[in-house]
Image (spheres, rainbow, N blue to C red):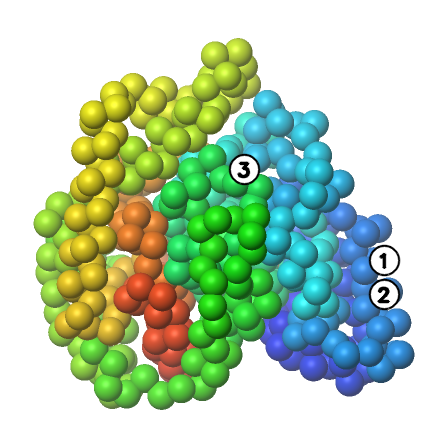
């Protein structure tokens, strides 16, 4: 049975807990109960941490009763993806090869969520080592989409998106090396932020450190902004982290978007969106015009598809890191992951560095592009759904495990901030729009996304 707590925003939960209208224990018990109750239907969790969560919730309530200074997420439940380290908890990467692995220390984002008062209830599922854009792995099985359990929630942050969409927690930590926050947020109709590369620290180091991000996944962009403000900022353990003041994304959610110059591209120059998806994003572009933005159609953002450049950074890096497992425990790994990693590690050094220089050229192209525009608007994905058990849409047989997503991986190469929010529906499944900003400009990305989101009706999946 649904509870009024299930789809309440983190902002409202934190306010009510601070005012002693509800307790963190009450909210956490409900989240844990719903996590357990939905495992059979959506399978979002790799581990549920009930005892530790209730201990943290009791401590949060004691702090409230003492009149302590409370963090912005005080007493609010959240989850962390299985690629993110939580001290003393399993960190399996969705792989049978790491089934007994336990993290030795907390990731910086987990430390910061605790400092903000949030209560961790469990770890969520991922595709194996984050290598697929769908939600299954050999260790945990299939994670399903709450909007239609015959569909995938996308990946690799599969469980994070599914649990937020189903109303288990309002907040989740995900990771994004080629779209792994934006893809599942799109397919489950929630909001996600891939901030500027290095804005949010990532440690222990990813197997694809030059493209990997960690970030918030929430039901609306205002909660994502609040979560961003709690976890972003320099950390000496991650040498790529950005030092200096943070953009105020909470304030951005209340700022008018009027006057923003938006380039709208259906294809980026190479993608093939389904007609019903394109129609939803066409309508979104008109909404931005009604909000006072200047929207200009732009067909070719890129000269060609940069997927080979991305694969050289992501799959070759992970394949090199996992080479001992590919040699000794190949039969325990997802065969589709094995195939793409073995192909990627065949790159010779000259070919790899050719791709490195192509990446620099791509960054320069984007720098010049954003001298003319404030934002780039596109679909987040070319399709509205994908059946469980499939790695690639039937309509895209020429694409591989990640190349079918088209719109997300270029901006891991450039490092620019990007968000996804729900734009509408096609065949009863959510469709997401992606907004990309110039380097280090999360403010305008969130400013526009929040304004658009306020024009959309609130909808939740039935039965959850």
| Residue 154 rendering spot, x and y as whole percentages | 44, 47
- 334 vs 362, nearest the viewer: 362
> From the image, which quarter does the N terminus lie in?
bottom right
> From the image, which quarter does the C terminus lie in?
bottom right
Is residue 239 positioned above or below 114 on the image? above
Is residue 262 positioned above or below 272 on the image? below
Q: Are marks 1 and 2 in contact (CB under 8 Å)?
A: yes
Q: Which residue is mark 2?
A: 59
Q: Quadrant of residue 347?
A: top left
For mark 3, does the 10 Å Cα neighbourhood hold few (<14), some (14 to 19), or many (20 or more) residues?
many
- In space, the residues marked 2 and 3 are separated at their CA atoms by 35 Å
- In space, the residues marked 1 and 2 are separated at their CA atoms by 6 Å
Q: Which residue is mark 1?
A: 55
Is residue 115 positioned above or below 209 on the image? below
Q: Are marks 2 and 3 in contact (CB under 8 Å)?
A: no
| Residue 339 rendering spot, x and y as whole percentages | 37, 21
- 205 vs 144, nearest the viewer: 205
- In space, the residues marked 3 and 1 are separated at their CA atoms by 30 Å
| Residue 346 rendering spot, x and y as whole percentages | 29, 19
> Residue placed at 57% from the left, 29% from the top?
95
Question: Which label's residue is closer to the chain start, 2 or 3?
Answer: 2
SS at badge 1: helix
For mark 2, does the 10 Å Cα neighbourhood hold few (<14), some (14 to 19), or many (20 or more) residues?
some
Which of discs 3 and 1 lies nearer the camera? The answer is: 1
Residue 179 seen in the figure:
yes
Residue 423 seen in the figure:
no
Q: Is residue 153 left or right of residue 56?
A: left
Q: Which residue is mark 3?
A: 142
| Residue 455 rendering spot, x and y as whole percentages | 38, 82
Q: Are marks 3 and 1 in contact (CB under 8 Å)?
A: no
Is residue 176 positioned above or below 340 on the image? below
């Amino acid at each position: 049975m649904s509870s009024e707590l299930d789809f309440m925003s983190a902002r409202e939960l934190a306010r009510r807990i601070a005012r002693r209208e509800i307790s963190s224990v009450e909210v956490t018990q409900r989240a844990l109960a719903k996590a357990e109750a939905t495992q059979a239907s959506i399978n979002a969790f790799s581990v549920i941490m009930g005892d530790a969560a209730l201990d943290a919730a009791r401590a949060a309530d004691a702090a409230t009763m003492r009149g302590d200074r409370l963090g912005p997420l005080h007493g609010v439940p959240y989850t962390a993806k299985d690629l993110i380290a939580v001290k003393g908890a399993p960190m399996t990467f969705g792989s049978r090869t790491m089934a007994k692995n336990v993290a030795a220390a907390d990731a910086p984002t987990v430390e910061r969520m605790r400092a903000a008062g949030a209560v961790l209830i469990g770890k969520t599922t991922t595709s194996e080592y984050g290598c697929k854009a769908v939600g299954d792995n050999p260790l945990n099985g299939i994670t399903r989409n709450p909007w239609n359990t015959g569909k995938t929630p996308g990946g690799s942050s599969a469980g994070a998106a599914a649990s937020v969409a189903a109303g288990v927690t309002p907040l989740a930590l995900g990771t994004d090396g080629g779209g792994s926050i934006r893809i599942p947020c799109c397919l489950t109709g929630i909001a996600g932020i891939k901030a500027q590369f290095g804005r949010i620290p990532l440690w222990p180091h990813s197997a694809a450190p030059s493209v990997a991000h960690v970030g918030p996944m929430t039901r609306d962009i205002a909660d994502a902004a609040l979560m961003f403000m709690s976890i972003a900022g320099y950390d000496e353990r991650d040498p790529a982290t950005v030092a200096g003041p943070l953009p105020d994304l909470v304030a951005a959610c209340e700022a008018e978007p009027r006057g923003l110059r938006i380039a709208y591209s259906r294809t980026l120059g190479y993608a093939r969106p389904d007609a019903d998806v394109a129609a939803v994003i066409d309508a979104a572009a008109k909404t931005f015009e009604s909000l006072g933005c200047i929207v200009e159609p732009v067909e070719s953002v890129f000269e060609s598809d940069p997927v080979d450049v991305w694969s050289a950074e992501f799959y070759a890096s992970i394949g090199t890191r996992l080479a001992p497992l590919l040699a000794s425990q190949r039969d325990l790994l997802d065969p589709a992951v094995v195939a793409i990693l073995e192909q990627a590690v065949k790159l010779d050094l000259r070919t790899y560095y050719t791709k490195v220089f192509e990446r620099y050229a791509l960054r320069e192209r984007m720098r010049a592009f954003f001298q003319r525009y404030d934002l780039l608007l596109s679909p987040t994905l070319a399709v509205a759904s994908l059946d469980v058990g499939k790695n690639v849409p039937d309509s895209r047989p020429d694409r591989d495990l990640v190349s079918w997503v088209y719109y997300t991986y270029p901006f891991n190469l450039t490092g620019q901030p990007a968000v996804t929010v729900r734009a509408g529906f096609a065949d009863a499944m959510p469709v997401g729009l992606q907004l990309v900003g110039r380097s280090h400009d999360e403010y305008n990305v969130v400013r526009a996304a929040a304004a658009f989101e306020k024009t959309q009706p609130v909808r939740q999946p039935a039965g959850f």
